[in-house]
Amino acid sequence: MKNTVISYYSESITASLKNSSRLITGRVGFTIKYGEKLSLIGETGSGKTITALSIMGLLPQNVKCSGLEMTLKCGGGKTYRNEEVFKTVGSGIVYIPQNGLESLDPSRRVRGHLYDTLKKNGCPKTELGERALQMLRLSGFPQPENIIDLYPFQLSGGMAQRVTIALAMTGRESLIIADEPTNGLDRENSDNFVRLLDSSFPQAAKLIITHDMALAALTDSVLVLKNGTVMEKGPSKEVLENPRCMYTKSLISALVKNGMKETPVLRGENGSCPFYSRCPSACEKCSSVTVKTAGEHVWRCI
Ligand code: SF4
């Protein structure tokens, strides 16, 4: 696994409730290599964000991750293991939030945000101005002088997202985690965002949480989650163009461009497949569903 930046596996993530506990994810694992992008896709509540939070050690207090086996290679060749990885948040691991505008302090100009980040990362005071302009230039603003003194409310959604990318540029990042980064952006701005991510962080591994199949198609590999269970994973082209699991097929056919075919709600739950109650192809074989593989393509279905 010479080229692997992050290797992640968790046996389970569980939430403690008042009188009970609830399994949020079970046996989720993946690796991402240098410069590659992996998208985590699935419906709301499937466990995508909680998986990302477990990498950063930012799970809510009542949520516990068990059986964590994680390694992260950072610049300089140092490898962090399991809970040690949490210490790299903000330097080795950089998080790009869901909504660029909401993540910026409305009372501070772009300059203030950039200066804070640069100071935190040890930039000398005398270099702050030039470095801030350089970060904006690299994140797609050809004339950063026109941007640096704007307040967040003066930025469009696409501009705000580019400012969050500028803020993420520490120069030491190994893993970028982007949570629904193209929410609220049109197709052109979404595609630009991915190009910018690649040009800004060419070596970093990128984990992208998304509902957007068009965005997932621009990543190298895809992991499909349903109720915390990995339904399918593999190279994006293979999974999205030749899905083997009925759940992935349903997700793809639910897109507007594919006719938004509804999946019926017909039957009671079946413990072995989280999609059983809505799956159009469910049958008696689904009670003993197994994991199948073909090269790097892995899926759970009959
Ligand atoms: S195992 Fe059965 S219920 Fe689950 S996705 Fe496949 S066909 Fe549908």
Image (cartoon, rainbow, N blue to C red):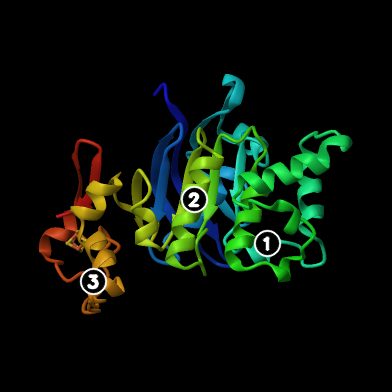
Q: Is 107 left or right of 39, judged from the image as shown?
A: right
Residue type of the residue flagged with mark 1: Ser
**Does residue 218 appear anywhere in the picture?**
yes
Callout 3: CB less than 8 Å from ligand 1: no
**Does residue 229 appear anywhere in the picture?**
no
Q: Is 70 left or right of 147, judged from the image as shown?
A: left
Q: Are marks 3 and 1 in contact (CB under 8 Å)?
A: no
Callout 1: CB less than 8 Å from ligand 1: no
Q: Quadrant of the C terminus?
A: bottom left
| In the image, residue 138 above or below residue 75 | below
Helix, strand or loop status at disc 3: helix
Residue at which label 1 appears: 103
Q: Are marks 2 and 1 in contact (CB under 8 Å)?
A: no
| In the image, residue 220 above or below residue 143 | above
Residue type of the residue flagged with mark 2: Thr
Q: Residue at x 25, y 37 (%)?
A: 296
Q: Residue at x 30, y 71 (%)?
A: 255
Badge number at residue 258: 3
